[in-house]
Image (cartoon, rainbow, N blue to C red):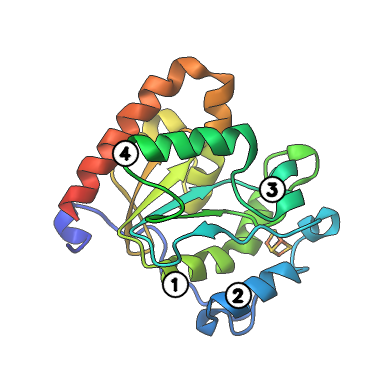
Amino acid sequence: MMLEELGLQPVWKLREREREVPGVAAMGWEELGKTISSCTICPLHKGRNKAVVGAGNPHADWLFIGEAPGAEEDRTGEPFVGQAGKLLDNMLAAIGLSRKSNVYIANTVKCRPPGNRNPEPSEMSACRPYLERQIELVGPKLIVILGRIAAQSVLDSDASIASLRGKRHACRNVPAIVTYHPAYLLRNPEDKAKAWEDLCFARRFMKEL
Ligand code: SF4
């Protein structure tokens, strides 16, 4: 279904990112992974142990986008490991999804910010060519954005997560919704019910696509 038929406008215009990352628009998964792993475009590469490219089905209908790798992710090179990763896997399972079959997971930045601070807008902007290429390569039907930092970056918005939840958005030409980041839910378990509402909303939205 076309975005216009869903009442959505694409937020990301197709950006020419060749200047920042030469050749990124033509890269396949292997080259993209190698390029990310050796990338020095933003300062986050200085503290990197392993870049975290993403994980899951590279042609999934569902794409989940988080914020940034943490310490465990930096050590293993896998996104969403540890307690937040377990919670995300449980959230996925609750609506019949799994990173082993029908989901791809990526972050707005591929290298861990020092001390687990939030990534800076400039760092997310620098890393965006990679995320854009991942979106193109996966070709998802629906994007689920995890948390305020990722949502504001991906949707080019300064709105609060409260105002972004429960609404239909679009990222490039792909429909998108926003929910809480699992790490936030670990700190604020009283909001898990709202996250469940968001997942049910996402599931209903997906059925229309
Ligand atoms: Fe490159 Fe992204 Fe890592 Fe920055 S966060 S060094 S842009 S891969």
Between discs 2 and 1, the one toward the N terminus: 2
Q: Point out the frontmost of discs 1 and 3.
A: 3
Give the number of the disc on residue 73: 3
Residue at 51 percent of width and 32 percent of height: 87
Q: Residues within 10 Å of mark 2 (few under 14, many from 20)?
A: some
- Tag 2 secondary structure: helix
Marks 3 and 4, how far apart in space? 24 Å
Q: Point out the frontmost of discs 1 and 4.
A: 4
Q: Amino acid at mark 4?
A: Ile
Q: Which residue is mark 4?
A: 95
Marks 3 and 2, how far apart in space? 18 Å
Q: Which residue is mark 1?
A: 137
Residue 160 seen: no
Residue 123 seen: yes
Which quadrant of the view contains residue 55? Answer: bottom right
Q: Is residue 135 above or below residue 31?
A: above
Between discs 1 and 3, the one toward the N terminus: 3
Q: Residue furthest right?
A: 46
Residue 172 in percent (x, y) is at 38, 63
Residue 48 in percent (x, y) is at 80, 56
Marks 1 and 4, how far apart in space? 24 Å
Residue 188 or residue 7, whichever sits in front: 188
Residue 177 in percent (x, y) is at 35, 44
